[in-house]
Amino acid sequence: RVLKVMVMARELQVLLMGFASAMKAMFWASIMLVVLLTLWSIVAVEVLHPINMRIAERGIYEGCSRCERAFSTVMHSNLTFLQQLLAGDSWGQVSIPIIEEEPATAFVFMAVMGMVNLGL
């Protein structure tokens, strides 16, 4: 029955084909964003983690169980960026102390935010 309706209603068929094409494009865009975020996470482990460890040793992250390991591995970096960029949660808790310690790291955070926001 559904096929009969689809054959009879050309507009419905066109609409469903457009929906399928849009879902395919969104799937590949999501894959591209995950790859891009993973590349930035590799950079974060190399650049941000040493700075983050210096900050953690001074006790600035007291009361935050996750802050000192936020950029310790690529997976933790991915999770931190997802939390900060997609959920918009806890920007100031991890990023602000790192930027205050090393102001040049603001360019890393701005680049990640810019590329992910442009990708969305």
Image (tube, rainbow, N blue to C red):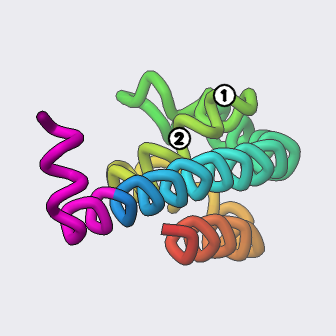
Q: Which residue is mark 1?
A: 75
The residue pinned by badge 2 equals 80
Residue 22, image quadrant: bottom left
- Observer-nearest residue: 57 or 6? 6
Residue 58 showing in the rendered view: no
First in sequence, mark 2 or 1: give its number.
1
| In this rendering, position of residue 46 left or right of residue 101 | right
Residue situated furthest top in the rendering: 65
The answer for how far apart the CA atoms under marks 2 and 1 are is: 9 Å
**Mark 1 closeness class: few <14, some 14–19, many ≥20 residues within 10 Å:** some
Which residue is at a point 37% across and 65% down the rendered structure image?
18
- Position of residue 74 measured from the top left corner of the image (x, y, whole percent): 74, 32
Residue 69 spot, x, y in % from top left: 62, 27
Which secondary structure lies at badge 1?
helix
- The correct choice, above or below, for 3 with respect to 9 in the image is above
Task: Kindly give the residue lying farthest to the right in the view shown.
Answer: 46
Query: In percent of the image, x 58 and y 58: which residue is there?
Result: 29
Kind of residue at badge 1: Met
Q: Residues within 10 Å of mark 2 (few under 14, many from 20)?
A: many
Residue 84's label in the rendered image is: none
Residue at x 27%, y 66% (from the top left corner): 15
Q: Tell whether position 25 is magenta.
A: no
Residue 38 vertical position relative to residue 91 in the rendered view, above or below = above
Q: In this rendered view, identify the residue nearer to me: 39 or 35.
A: 35
Q: Which residues are magenta?
A: 1-16
Total marks in image: 2
Percent position (x, y) of residue 51?
A: 76, 48
